Image (cartoon, rainbow, N blue to C red):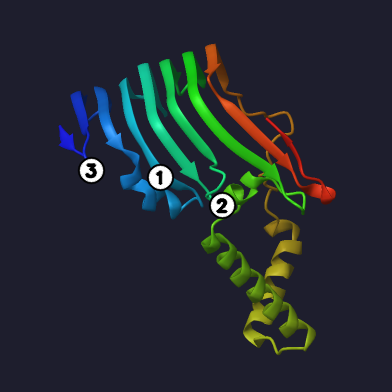
Amino acid sequence: RAKMPGGGLLDLSGDYRADPLLVNGTVKASDIRLEKFADFVENRVPLKVGGGTLGLGMQVKLEQQAQDLQVTVQNGQLELLELALDDAATQPPLLRAKKISVNGVALDLVQQNVEVAQVLFDGVDSHHWLDENGKLRTDALLTPPAGDNGAAAAQNATQQQSSAAQQNGAPQNNSTVQNNSAQQQNTASPQNAAAPQNNATPQNSTSKPWNIHIGEYHLGNSTLTFTDKSGGMNAQQT
């Protein structure tokens, strides 16, 4: 049992075997204060966690099966109370929810199957819009992190410098040119020709889709407000 920052408890119990790998356990969490993890979330997504408590429970099994790691979850349940989420515009609020609960969750990783018995939303208040430039309020939440943009910019700069050097007639290393010429001669020789390798993915190969089934979905005492500000409009629908 572990005490979480700001209150709440995390319980882990079960047994395991190292070889072959087998973990069979139960995970329980109660009264986890989500605002204590706000910095962790905001460093990855421009989303501010203003409040909320989390409770969850599940039975988890990890088992090594030949080349696959099988993960199954049974009797999963999750409950969020008094959830408050905001973006850069704190008013009107992005999302407020008195209660969000998910019950009867079962997952099979190898079969790529998820079963959810019930999903409940109660007391949800959410505000969205389309701004003057035709962008949704949630677009900013899908923007790649600044670190990814910086890496891409550095890669583009390197490619541009390499291209400029070639256009300006930058001298090449003579040994490199000779080695490349020798490799081309060896490749052209029938005796040295290697059998072609096909690394392309077959056209008829397709990944197996996930199967997700939700038994019941309930939405009550909730309001969704959408405002269209594009094209000089200011139309609101609730």
At mark 3, the secondary structure is loop
Give the label on residue 71, or none. Answer: none
Circle 1 is placed at which residue position?
50
Residue 23 drawn at (x, y percent): 26, 25
- Residue at (34% x, 31% y) in the render: 54
- Residue at (77% x, 88% y) in the render: 169
At mark 1, the secondary structure is strand
Circle 2 is placed at which residue position?
89
- Residue at (54% x, 32% y) in the render: 125
Residue placed farthest to the right in the image? 231
Residue 168 drawn at (x, y percent): 77, 88
Whether residue 198 is visible: no
Judged by depth in the image, the label closer to the viewer, 1 or 3, is 1
**Residue situated in front as seen by the camera: 172 or 226:** 226
C-alpha separation, residue under disc 2 versus residue under disc 1: 13 Å
Q: Amino acid at mark 1?
A: Gly
The first of marks 2 and 3 along the sequence is 3
At mark 2, the secondary structure is loop
Q: Amino acid at mark 3?
A: Gly
